[in-house]
Image: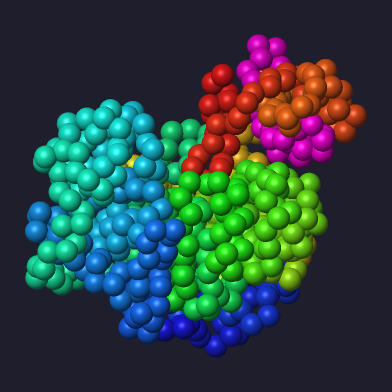
Amino acid sequence: MKHHRSAPSGHGSVPSDRPWFRHWPSGVPKHIDYPQKPLPFLLEDTARRRSDSIAFSSATDSIAFSKLSQKSDAFASGLHSINIRKGDRVLLLLPNIIEFVISFYGTLKSGAAVVSLHHLVREAELSKALEESEPKAAVILSSLSPAEREVLNKSRVRVIEVGELAASKSISFGQFVSKRRAYPHVSVSADDPAVIQYTGATTGAPKPAVMSHFNLLANAVQNATWFGWDENEKVLGILPLCHTWGCSCCMNSPIYTGARTIFVGRFDPEVVLQTIEAEHATVLYGSATMFSVLLNSPGIERFNLSSLKWVKAGAMPIPVELKRKWDEKTGIPLVLGYGLTEASPETHDSPPNRIREGTIGIPIIDTDAKIVDLETGNELEPGKPGELLIRGPQVTKLGYLNDEEETERALRGGWFHTGDIGIMDAEGYFTLVDRKKDIIKYKGYTIYPVELEEVLYGHPAVRECAVVGKKHSEFGEVPKAFIVCRKGSALTKKDVVEFCEKRVAPYKKIREVEFIECLPKTPVGKVLRRKLRDK
């Protein structure tokens, strides 16, 4: 199965007069006939075509597509043997290792849904997730901390451990997938829940979004088709698979195309750059933070990165200055895009040969988008800021787990309301301005933090920054900047204020400055503004 396409002229449900179709990438279909199958269909199809090809590898391990299919079958059978049935949930607390992929696809084959959390999750977050999602089993590393292990013990979930068993009641992962059992042929629909993924929660409490098998399958196909991937790609698997971005781009899309994903363990810039050269990696995904760290690594000059064909940045607005520096230093254009958990996650990408600086590109295959007025909900003309609304096959229709009110708020009139403020220009390119909840209201004026952050990134002493609104008894809110300085800099608060004053309108100027060692972030590099506001 290479592609399931209709005639190239079809636009699906997207109106044919959308302006971005004038800049559509050559050779990319505007519509795809996606197989109405559960997500594991992609693995089974590729395992037949590329049985002996390596699917995933690390410095110490590798697995072929056929073996991955067999192991995930065994995992599904194992779940069935401990009474996990269709509609149940299995929690994965694993880093980017082959056992994650086996557990993920095995869970889906069993008819259960995956609940995915970062493996370094803390007690409070784990307790909340267990209470909300009620998984019946959990797959963990044997090195899981005692505090988190105690939380699991209290919940009475069946624990499957990767590594040497640390608890007598746990099940060994190795034994779990090596026993021969009858395979449970469960009827799973494309519309059944596949993953419960907690949102990044940069502005508020994490919400458990529910994506169907079809949502995930569609985005895997969309992503690979947009960039023209084939079975020869080598994807560097840096993004955490426990997040929908890593799940789609570093696991599901490579499985769909028959490509190989290379795991590198914890993010280490020297190891990443060395691996690109040694393995001839062709695809690299990362956040602005990751690319900033790579640029500041000595290895950026030492290692040969010429094998890279696609370098994609997302998770947060990418400073224009960072993109320019990356492009100049590496000669490999940094492609910008946009997505969110509830869209599995990708909705916008830059056409590879038509990147427009400062934009998130255009809606991808079968994806519609518009900008609406924050008050009236009416669609706005190009150039005006408003809320970004999206729809497409990758966007959840299941909403949020056990939260009808939030689901109805987000899914209105056939559109998903992102809560992000954006602008569409006359050519159909979108620019992300800010989160609706992050807007600063100063004396009735609207201030977008991202605009101020772009200014701050222009200062040579600023390595990273984030601007938030601080409550003020007289003015409502005032802009406060949190700044991570470059090593050896002598930047002062006065320097920051004066630098901004010369570059923005008086009402937008920075009123407070705090220097910090690092910005709080999600696993994929999004700045947690809510934590900064709480400081």
Q: Locate the C terminus by quadrant.
A: top right
User: Of 269 and 334, which appears nearest the observer?
Assistant: 269
Residue depicted at 64% across the width and 67% down the height: 308
What x and y, as percent, mark residue 77? 15, 64
User: Of 324 and 390, which appears nearest the observer?
Assistant: 324
The residue sitting at the right extreme is 502
Vertical placement of residue 212 versus 169, above or below: below
Vertical placement of residue 408 versus 129, above or below: below
Residue depicted at 61% across the width and 34% down the height: 438
Residue depicted at 39% across the width and 38% down the height: 120
Q: How is the image coloured?
A: rainbow
Asked which quadrant contains residue 57, the reply is: bottom left
Vertical placement of residue 400 versus 16, above or below: above
Looking at the image, residue 352 sits to the left or right of residue 117; the answer is right
Q: Is residue 234 visible?
A: yes
Q: What are the residue bounds of the magenta stretch?
A: 449-475
What x and y, as percent, mark residue 516? 64, 23
Q: Is residue 333 magenta?
A: no
Looking at the image, residue 5 sits to the left or right of residue 72; the answer is right
Asked which quadrant contains residue 454, the reply is: top right
Q: Is residue 374 visible?
A: no
User: Of 31 and 338, which appears nearest the observer?
Assistant: 338
